Amino acid sequence: MGRKMSAEIFKRAVKVIPGGVNSPVRALKAVGGKPIFIKRARGSKIYDVDGGMYIDYIGSWGPMILGHANPEVTSALKKAVENGTSYGAPTLLEVLLAEDVLEAFPSMDMVRFVNSGTEATMSAIRLARAYTGRDRIIKFEGCYHGHADSLLVKAGSGAATFGVPDSPGVPADIAKNTYTAVYNDLGSIKRILEKDPEGVACVIVEGVAGNMGVVKPKAGFLEGLRALTSQYKAILIMDEVMSGFRLCYGGAQKIYNITPDMTCLGKIIGGGLPVGAFGGRREIMEMLSPSGPVYQAGTLSGNPLAMTAGIITLKELKKKGVYERLTTLTDTLCMGISEIAKRRGIDCQVAVAGSMFTVFFNASPVKNYGDAKRSDLERFSAYFRMMTKNGIFIPPSQFEAVFVSLAHTKADMEKTLDAVDRSFKGLRG
Ligand SMILES: *Cc1c(COP(=O)(O)O)cnc(C)c1O
C-alpha cells in the first residue's frame, strides 16, 4: 500500500529507536503491519505522512476524548506556554486540577500528580505496602497497569500461586510478591487471601477492564472484591487510568458504586499531555513524602502545560449532555456493527462500556483474559487491515479498546459502518 514516506522514516527509526517506536503497540506487529507515521490530527481525523486520512478510534489510547487539537485546549495551551513550561515549584494549576479530580472521585481525599499511568500505579502500590506493612500484591490476569516490575508478572504454572516475570529483566524475587487472579472470578481471589491472610498489601484492578479488550465486571464482582479486601485488611486500588472520565464524569467506581481505598488516574486527566495521578483516603495519602515517610517525587510532576490541558478537558467534559452524546454515538456504532455481523454471518461479540468498546471475534461472551485469548486473532488482523484500507484507524490488537470521542460525527459513524460492512464481507471469504 502507498505508505512510502512511513516506510522511509521507519527505516531510519529502527536504527535509532528500538523497533522504531517508543511504545511497542505502535509497531503494528500484532497485526503483521508496519508503523504508520503521523503528521497531524484534528477533531476525529488523523493524518499520516503519506497523505492518508483516517477516522481515528485510537485517540492516543484514550486521552483524546474531546477529539484532537480541541480548540479550547489548544488556545489555553498557547497562552500557558508563554508563561514558561516548567518551574519545579508549585502552582495554583495543580490545586485546581486536584480539586476537580477530588470532586469527581469522592473516594479520594487527596491526590498526587505524576507523569504517567505507570508511575501512578507503581507509587500507589508502594504506598499500599507502606500503609499495611505487607509486601505481596494481587493483580488480575489480562489487566494492564503499566510497566513497573511488580506489575509485569504472570501466573506461575500449575498449583504455584506465586507469580513469575512476564518480561526478561523483572527479577523473580520481585515477581514472586505478585499473585495473579482471574478477572470476574471472586473464588480465585478468595483462595489467595485465605492462603496468605496477612501478607497481601493490596489488590489492584481495572474499574472496567480495557486492556484485554473491554471486559465489564459482572454483577457482584467489584462488590465482592471490596468486601474481601476489607475483610483481609488489604488496600483496594482501582486503576481507572483508562476508565476515569471515559465512562462518566468520574470513574467505574461511580457507576458500580464502589469505594476503593486508592485510585489511579491518567490518560484523559492530562488532555493529551503526560499526566498520571494517584489518590485515596487521607490517612493513606498523608504517609507520602513530605507529609510522611514514603518517598515519591518527579521533576516534571504537576507540569503547568499538562495541568492546563487537564483542567480544560475536565471543564469541557463537565458540560451538560456530554456523556449522553458520547454514549449515544458509541451505542449507535456498536449496534450497527452487531447488525452487520449478523447479516454477514460473522461470529463476534461487541463489548461496550461508555465510550469504549471491543469487537471480539469470538463465538462466546468474553468474561476474562482466558476467554479473550480464545478469539480469532487472524480474523482480527484481517479486519484491522481492511479497516485501515478503508480509512478507519482502530487499535491494532484484539486486546485493546476502541475509543469514541466527542469530535466524532454522524457522518463519521456512517463511514465507519460502511467500512465495517466491507471488512466483514471480506472476512467471510
Ligand atoms: C494506560 C494504562 C496504564 C499505564 O499508563 P501509561 O501512561 O501508559 O504509563 C495503567 N493502567 C491502565 C488501566 C491503563 O489503561
Image: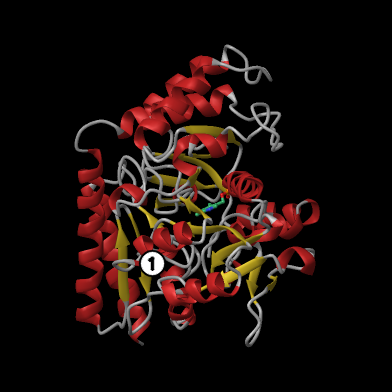
The image position of residue 125, as x and y in percent, is 62, 50
**Residue at (62% x, 20% y) in the render:** 85
Instruction: From this view, report whether residue 226 is shown above or below residue 344.
Output: above
**Residue at (29% x, 67% y) in the render:** 219
Q: Residues within 10 Å of mark 1 (few under 14, many from 20)?
A: many
Q: Is residue 106 left or right of residue 340?
A: right
Residue 193 falls in which quadrant of the image? bottom right
Closer to us: 188 or 348: 188
Q: Is residue 266 left or right of residue 21?
A: left
Instruction: From this view, report whether residue 263 is shown above or below residue 112.
Output: below
Closer to us: 418 or 22: 22
Can residue 392 be seen here? The reply is no
* Residue holding disc 1: 215
Residue 324 falls in which quadrant of the image? top left
The image position of residue 393, as x and y in percent, is 43, 57
Element on which disc 1 rests: loop
**Quadrant the C terminus occupies:** bottom left
Q: Is residue 327 left or right of residue 159?
A: left
> What amino acid type is highlighted by mark number 1?
Val
Closer to us: 330 or 116: 116
Closer to us: 44 or 354: 354
**Residue at (47% x, 47% y) in the render:** 261
The image position of residue 368, as x and y in percent, is 43, 74
